[in-house]
Amino acid sequence: MGWGTPLENVAEGVTIRRSARARRMTLRVSRLDGRVTLTLPPRTSDRAARNFLQDHAGWIANAREKTAPETRIEVGARLPVEGRLRRIEPGQGRQARIFEDRIEMPGPRALETALKHLARDRALPRIDHYASRVDRAVSGVSFRDTRSRWGSCTSEGRVMLSWRLVMAPPEVFDYVIAHEVAHLVEMNHSAAFWSVVEGLRPDFRDAKRWLKAEGPALHRFRFE
């Protein structure tokens, strides 16, 4: 038809999604990794989307520059574990070992596995503790490397947590656990829900602020 550059060329590196609930075009740049998502109303034309991206090219570039740079897990790097930075040193055998002042690892995948085990060891007793406080039962717990949320809880009582939370200060990890267990009582974010959270963690606001400000940086570490 000859009426411009194809949308896929302009939108290179941009995730395009159409939403029945969208009333206007919106751009979102992830603070975690700089990924750009353009959300479109269902009837938006490719031409309109292309023009929108071109008009906002400068904004996208500036937003991407502000995202945290990736850090490869390797000997000599420093990694936070339970809120404390620890230097990574070469290790023997197949398993990584985490000490108060350092980490010994044979490779990044071994360290990732060790962090997942540590996250589970720290979280399970606290989940049981908070579940008993609200007199509810948890039917299952899983740990994932999610980027869009730190945790979730289903109406069936299944709790999911990001294992990367074990890198945060313990009180932050504990807040997320309390948050998800509180959903066993209130499956929403109403005032009643936050009242349950406060009953479990009276100081939750400090942890919530830390997570908003510092949490995205936990995703910059690449275990490859």
Image (cartoon, helix red, strand yellow):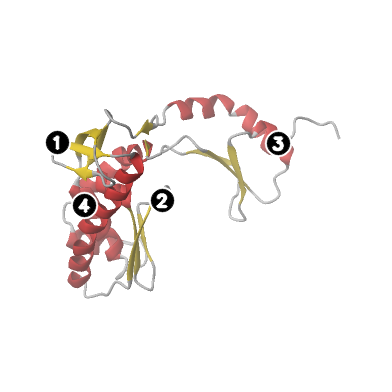
Q: Nearer the viewer, mark 3 or mark 4?
A: 3
**Residue tagged 3:** 7
Q: Nearer the viewer, mark 1 or mark 3?
A: 1
Query: Which is nearer the eye, 100 or 57?
Result: 100
How far is the residue under mark 3 from the one under mark 2?
A: 29 Å
Cβ atoms under marks 2 and 1 closer than 8 Å: no
Quarter of the view holding residue 178? bottom left
Residue 38: horizontal and vertical position, in percent? 58, 41
Residue type for callout 3: Leu
**Residue tagged 1:** 101
Residue 156: horizontal and vertical position, in percent? 38, 73
Q: Nearer the viewer, mark 2 or mark 1?
A: 1
How far is the residue under mark 2 from the one under mark 1?
A: 28 Å
Q: Badge 1: how crowded within 10 Å, few (<14), some, or many (20+)?
A: few
How far is the residue under mark 3 from the one under mark 4?
A: 44 Å
Residue lying at the far left of the rendered structure: 100
Tell me if residue 94 can be seen.
yes
- The image's mark for residue 40 is none
Q: Tell me the SS state at disc 2.
A: loop
**Residue at the (21%, 54%) spot, across then down:** 174
**Residue at the (22%, 42%) spot, across then down:** 81
How far is the residue under mark 4 from the one under mark 2?
A: 22 Å
Quarter of the view holding residue 161? bottom left
Q: Nearer the viewer, mark 3 or mark 2?
A: 2
Residue type for callout 4: Phe
**Residue at the (30%, 61%) spot, across then down:** 180
**Residue tagged 2:** 146
Tell me if residue 192 can be seen.
no
**Residue at the (23%, 64%) spot, across then down:** 127
Is tag 2's residue or tag 1's residue first in the polypeptide sequence?
Answer: 1
**Residue tagged 4:** 204
Is tag 1's residue or tag 3's residue first in the polypeptide sequence?
Answer: 3
